[in-house]
Image (cartoon, rainbow, N blue to C red):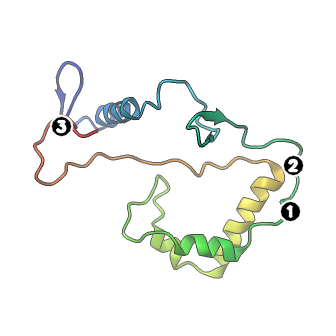
Amino acid sequence: MVKNSSKYLKNHRENTIKLCGEAICKHLRSCEQEQSSDWPIIFRQDEKAEMISPFQGEPKPLEKPITPEEVRKSFNSLNNNKAPGEDEIHAELLKYGTPLLDQTIADIFNTTFNKHEKIDINRRVLIAIQKPGKNKGPPNNL
């Protein structure tokens, strides 16, 4: 159960997700400033955030294109038995994919840089799960 300012909400998935997201944002102080979700944030050593554009200048190929071997290395570093993201692709599918998959993903990333086409790779789905042995109620340890 999740509690808003006036009462507990039960079986209202959208409200629950919204309230949990708001609580997490408030806790992390990441909702203080309006940000464009399309642009990444770079954190410097002094912990100040700076908005940067995804692409600058004219489109051009990378000096050293992303290789299928680099893609394979990144796939192999993924953890098994983790929940998939919004795309419902499990890490195991990527880890045990064929060389054709590695080449296809490398081509997609290289094309993204060559043409300045944005791809949405940073979306996540957050689902609050009750910890075993904890009392049910509002999320006290956010």
Q: Assess whether mark 1 and mark 2 are in contact (beta carbons under 8 angstroms).
A: no
Vertically, is 73 above or below 29?
A: below
- 6 lies left or right of 60: left
Q: Which amino acid does label 2 sit on?
A: Pro
Q: Is mark 1 on a helix, strand or loop?
A: loop
Q: Quadrant of residue 34?
A: top right
Residue occupied by mark 3: 1
- 111 lies left or right of 21: right
Location of residue 108 in the rendering, given as x and y in whole percent from the top left corner: 72, 61
Number of other residues with Cα within 10 Å of mark 2, as a class: few under 14, some 14 to 19, many 20 or more: some
Residue occupied by mark 1: 63
The C terminus, quarter of image: top left
Location of residue 44 in the rendering, given as x and y in whole percent from the top left corner: 62, 41
Vertically, is 78 above or below 41?
A: below
Residue occupied by mark 2: 59
The N terminus, quarter of image: top left
Separation of marks 1 and 3 at Cα, in angstroms: 52 Å
Number of other residues with Cα within 10 Å of mark 3, as a class: few under 14, some 14 to 19, many 20 or more: some
Separation of marks 2 and 1 at Cα, in angstroms: 12 Å
Q: What residue type is labelled 3?
A: Met
Separation of marks 3 and 2 at Cα, in angstroms: 49 Å
Q: Quadrant of residue 21?
A: top left
The residue sitting at 70% across, 46% down in the picture is: 118
Number of other residues with Cα within 10 Å of mark 1, as a class: few under 14, some 14 to 19, many 20 or more: few
